[in-house]
Image (cartoon, coloured by chain):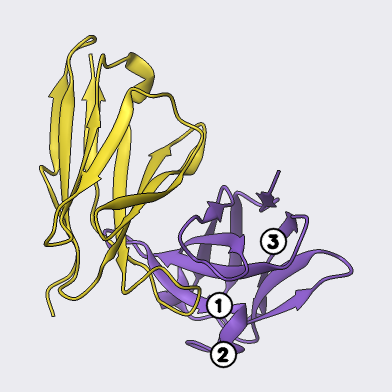
Amino acid sequence: AQRVTQPEKLLSVFKGAPVELKCNYSYSGSPELFWYVQYSRQRLQLLLRHISRESIKGFTADLNKGETSFHLKKPFAQEEDSAMYYCALTSAGSARQLTFGSGTQLTVLP
Amino acid sequence: KAGVTQTPRYLIKTRGQQVTLSCSPISGHRSVSWYQQTPGQGLQFLFEYFSETQRNKGNFPGRFSGRQFSNSRSEMNVSTLELGDSALYLCASSLEGHVTDTQYFGPGTRLTVL
């Protein structure tokens, strides 16, 4: 069975500090991994996906197959980064069925 | 482009009743997925429809069903409601459901079962 684990429910950092949101997964096969974000009173939206190797809003995520991790990182956190972040995976070839982690609430303090 | 819309936004029902939720995808999107979000279980996949056919189904009882119309609008139905069905129900649309397609989420329907 596939599973996504986000060990931190809450994470607080100061503005300008680096931030890392952890995501570990278990999946037998080649997963595709995503990070979704939900800002206060907004919809859940895609932040970035592994397949695109992109950097969005200064965030990057590296897939480590050996450690089965897909941690989200940003070198300098901003107050507007405060949000709920969800890591998700799906099987390669389809994004139709996402398995989500439980989410990490990030608060960036002034 | 208008985003994904869901109606109604809030719903209160009693145990044993049934409920129908509606989702209108972004114009041109043919894949619609449904998710249940609860504090205890988080976000869980219910099912996905494409061209009026259910392609994927999550691990939910048969009381949960859905359908998709020719204009890609989708409905989900929950029969014989239980207290544990209280949740936020989200739908998401994408062009065709490929891994390179972005899934766009709606605002959700908040269902409360009394």
> Which residue shows up at 39% across the image and 45% down it?
B47
Q: Which chain is yellow?
A: B
Q: Nearer the viewer, mark 3 or mark 1?
A: 1
Give the chain of mark 1: A
Q: Are marks 2 and 3 in contact (CB under 8 Å)?
A: no
The N terminus of chain A lies in which quarter of the figure? top right
Q: CA distance from mark 3 to mark 1?
A: 13 Å
Residue type, label 3: Cys
Please state which of residues A77 and A2 is positioned toward the viewer in this rendering: A2
Of the residues under marks 2 and 1, which one precedes in the sequence?
A: 1
Residue type, label 2: Glu
The kind of secondary structure element at disc 2 is: loop
Please state which of residues B99 and B92 is positioned toward the viewer in this rendering: B99
| Residue pointed to by mark 1 | A49
Left or right, A47 with reference to B4: right
In the rendered image of this protein, which colour is used for chain A?
Answer: purple
Give the chain of mark 2: A
Residue type, label 1: Arg
> Which residue shows up at 69% across the image and 61% down it?
A23
| Residue pointed to by mark 2 | A54
Q: Are marks 2 and 1 in contact (CB under 8 Å)?
A: yes
Give the chain of mark 3: A
Label 1 crowding class (10 Å Cα cut-off): few <14, some 14-19, many 20+? Answer: many
Q: Does any portion of residue B86 appear in the rendered image?
A: no
Q: Which mark is residue A23?
A: 3
Of the residues under marks 2 and 3, which one precedes in the sequence?
A: 3
Q: Are marks 2 and 3 on the same chain?
A: yes
Please state which of residues A23 and A88 is positioned toward the viewer in this rendering: A88
Of the residues under marks 3 and 1, which one precedes in the sequence?
A: 3
Left or right, B38 with reference to B107: right
